[in-house]
Image (cartoon, rainbow, N blue to C red):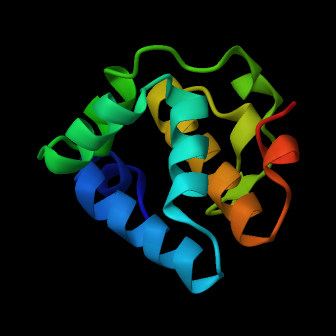
Amino acid sequence: MSKLNTMTTEFTTYYAHVLKEAEDRNHTKEQVDTIIMWLTGYDEKALNQMIESRIDMEHFIKEAPAIHPNASMIQGRVNGEVVQDMQESTLKTIRQLEVLLEQLNKDEPLSTILRK
């Protein structure tokens, strides 16, 4: 997904996509939500409000209560980009989320994914 498409995709659409991918790999909504809440600082109620809203990914990240301080530990590649080397903070956070969700889909334990 290009930078523009990533930023303008509605969070609801993004969430439905990543949830389906996770469930197809026998993971749960709770696991997906835990990862999203860990990275962004949204609580369950606020996350559900974001899912029901028409907010795009750019604003979902920009309005996040608090990006987790351990987000800087997230390493990986998305669309050929080295996530830890990215400069643009909003897109970098979206890519960090994608790395975390991919780790879930590769069956890594939540304790590893959440950098505990």
Rendered location of residue 36, percent (x, y): 52, 41
Query: Residue 73 sits in which quadrant?
Result: top right
Q: Quadrant of the N terminus?
A: bottom left
Q: Quadrant of the C terminus?
A: top right
Q: Residue furthest bottom?
A: 24
Rendered location of residue 88, percent (x, y): 51, 27
| Residue 97 visible somewhere in the drawing | yes
Which residue is at 32% across, 43% downward?
57
Q: Nearer the viewer, residue 82 or 100?
A: 100
Is residue 16 shown above or below 7? below
Q: Nearer the viewer, residue 62 or 112?
A: 112
Is residue 36 shown above or below 106? above
| Residue 9 visible somewhere in the drawing | no
Which residue is at 85% across, 61% downward?
108
Is residue 112 shown above or below 27? above
Which residue is at 60% across, 31% downward?
38
Q: Relative to residue 9, is residue 92 drawn left or right?
A: right
Number of labels in the image equals: 0
